[in-house]
Image (spheres, rainbow, N blue to C red):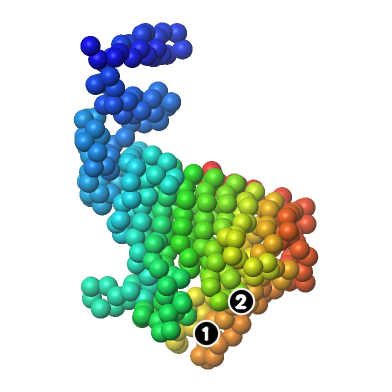
Amino acid sequence: MPPRFFFNVRTSSRYHFRMRIDRRDFLGLSALALAACRGLRGDAPFDAIVSTDAADRTLGIPCHASLGDALAVAPQASPRPWRIRIAHGRWHEKIVVAKPNIHLIGDGRGKSILDFDTAAGHLKADGKPWGTWGCASLIVRAPDFAARDLSIENTFDYIGEITRPRPTLEPIGANGAQAVALMLDAGADRSRIRNVDIHGHQDTLFVDAGRSHFLDCTISGSVDFIFGGGECLIERSRIVSRHRPGKERQGYVAVPSTQREQEFGLVLRDCRLEKEAAVAPASVALGRPWRPTRSFGDGRYGDPAIVGAAAFLDCWMDDHIDSAGWDAMSYTARDGSRQMFRPQDARLAEYRSRGPGARAGATRRVLGDAEAKKYTEAAILRGWT
């Protein structure tokens, strides 16, 4: 006779019962119990599952072989969160979320992995390069997106590209090797990312639109790896600078392109600025102000309405952060010349930094207590929490 298992199942705070099952039923029931337990915790049931596991096809929930397939059948305008479970495994897809209220829930960071390997200099089917705005593994263009308990990666071989004698990519900006993992694009707003690993190298996380809240995440990269013009609050997260062989300046962490009339841009609070072992001391800047080139009636040049805003509040910094803190960044002026956007001409600051990298410097603006009090969650996210 197969061995039997006994479970005490509580259905409410007052009632429970004892259940006996045979071992052969255990595996199928465990997956079902997991989904049921999520419902007992107060979560809504899943609307779809992305999985190739036969057991997941027995749960009575639509099961898809790819995230693209699951998104294709999601409603165009769901009035409630449309919850898609991403099962363990590596899902190699280039994804655009263009429907509101899509929530992606993985089986765990490092277990459920969304990845792709497109760089800005790679060519699309029409022969034109993807560019920074199109290369991301996951692009969000709709409001009320959420992701948790998974990983998002751009696995493009950045190190291989920058160490080749001759580049292989179409030049976009400096090198064409920008390879975004997650982009919040026009249309995104109220994006909530929790317990997610976001990995890349140059331009890992592009928060270019709307309000977004990142909590308990790990974000890794090297050059400009958290950047954009959105209103973004990153809390209690690991910010890991990666090594670039042969480079004196190893990278830049926060690179805002905030509109002048927008009070807050990129805000990192209670985070740890860490590094890979090979990253040298004093080789990474807190960031630099980015002024993107745009088209106007009188030509293409750096948008003068952009005055980047970024702040590090109560963050621990390892010794890779140098005493200068912030670097200047070049942009195209109206007359076509290249000019430097200096840190002191932007809105870049920190407050109560600590750790080996929390060094004083002439260009490291420190907020006073009264200024720091303005950086509330409600203010940064304009009332959305």
Residue at mark 1 to residue at mark 2: CA–CA distance: 25 Å
Q: Which residue is mark 1?
A: 332
Frontmost residue, 205 versus 297: 205
What residue occupies the far front of the structure in this picture? 1
Residue 176: percent from the left, percent from the top? 41, 77
Q: Residue at x 59, y 65 (%)?
A: 278
Frontmost residue, 296 versus 190: 190
Q: Residue at x 39, y 62 (%)?
A: 155
Q: Is residue 368 above or below residue 376?
A: below
Q: Residue at x 37, y 14 (%)?
A: 7
Q: Is residue 155 above or below residue 6?
A: below
Residue 385: percent from the left, percent from the top? 53, 43
Q: Amino acid at mark 2?
A: Glu
Observer able to see residue 288: yes
Q: Amino acid at mark 1?
A: Thr
Residue 182: percent from the left, percent from the top? 42, 58
Q: Which residue is mark 2?
A: 248
